[in-house]
Amino acid sequence: MMKIALGVEYMGTHFHGWQLQKSGIRTVQQVVEKSLSSIANHPVRVFCSGRTDAGVHAIEQVIHFETSAIRDNKAWLFGGNVNLPSDVNFTWAKQVDDQFHARFNAYARRYHYKIHNTKVRSAIIAQHALWEPRALNIELMNTAAQYLLGEHNFSAFRGSLCQAKSPIKTIEFIRLSKQDNDVLLDIKANAFLHHMVRNIVGTLLKVGRGERSVEWVQTVLASKDRQQAGATAQPQGLYFVKAFYPPI
């Protein structure tokens, strides 16, 4: 058996998340496994670096699977893409050693969250960014975000369906930037809780709109109480950027 890893890019708008569902509804894992199974000529089960929710996108999701089929990397990449719908794409493929695991070998993950900050909504990017019509103070949001740096108990930003064993995570960096009407939150951590990024965004938006003080974010973090934080931001602004691994 060989183990193959691939990079996967997708727009999550018309998917019910990454994970395969028993009901057969459309998920990214479903279409990816169907494509690779066709190339391998046997059923394929894939494992990913980080599951995404319905409506969430990925720039470089990493997956792996095992196969007895002898194919070169180009066959998995280009052959796989022929069998994929237009909103999913393999970006690279390579054979990896038996010890590699897309999820468990990843030591960090990075996300982007995009906000379209303008009074008039955009039909063009409605499925690719959160629309925020109110003015945002990006400097205050950046200052507040720095309270989240380092190792903390992030229970205040944890979704109710989270299955993580521990709420303690370490954020390596978090920063916001703005170009014209577009705001980008860039965040990297060793791991994330369910809805953690979207709950952080919803909390920082309250600071940016002037509804809460910068110091309030520190109070929310210390409370370990999800009810104290802001609302969960909508999924269409969230992008899984990449997972980080030791050299493979």
Image (cartoon, rainbow, N blue to C red):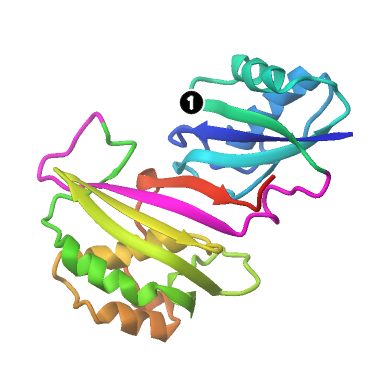
- Quarter where residue 63 is shown: top right
Element marked by disc 1: loop
Is 110 drawn above or below residue 155 in the view shown? above
Quarter of the N terminus within the rendering: top right
Reading the image, the residue beneath label 1 is 87
Taking the image as drawn, is residue 104 in sight? Answer: yes
Q: Residue at x 40, y 58 (%)?
A: 187
Is 32 drawn above or below residue 209 in the view shown? above
Is 72 drawn above or below residue 51 in the view shown? above
Dominant secondary-structure state across the stretch colored magenta: loop
- Quarter where residue 228 is shown: bottom left
Q: Residue at x 45, y 63 (%)?
A: 196
Please state which of residues 135 and 171 is positioned toward the viewer in this rendering: 171
Q: In the image, is 235 to the left or to the right of 90? A: left
Residue type (three-letter) at the residue carrying disc 1: Asp
**Residue that lies at the very extreme toward the front in this rendered image:** 247
Q: Residue at x 46, y 68 (%)?
A: 171
Tell me, yes or no, whether the highlighted magenta stretch contains residue 64: no
Q: In the image, is 49 to the left or to the right of 38? A: left
Q: In the image, is 13 to the left or to the right of 130? A: right
Mark 1 closeness class: few <14, some 14–19, many ≥20 residues within 10 Å: some
Q: In the image, is 111 to the left or to the right of 16? A: left
Taking the image as drawn, is residue 27 in sight? Answer: no
- Residue 204 at what x, y percent from top left? 27, 66
- Residue 189 at what x, y percent from top left? 49, 63
Quarter of the C terminus within the rendering: top right
- Residue 168 at what x, y percent from top left? 55, 76
Span shown in magenta: 98-124
- Residue 236 at what x, y percent from top left? 37, 43
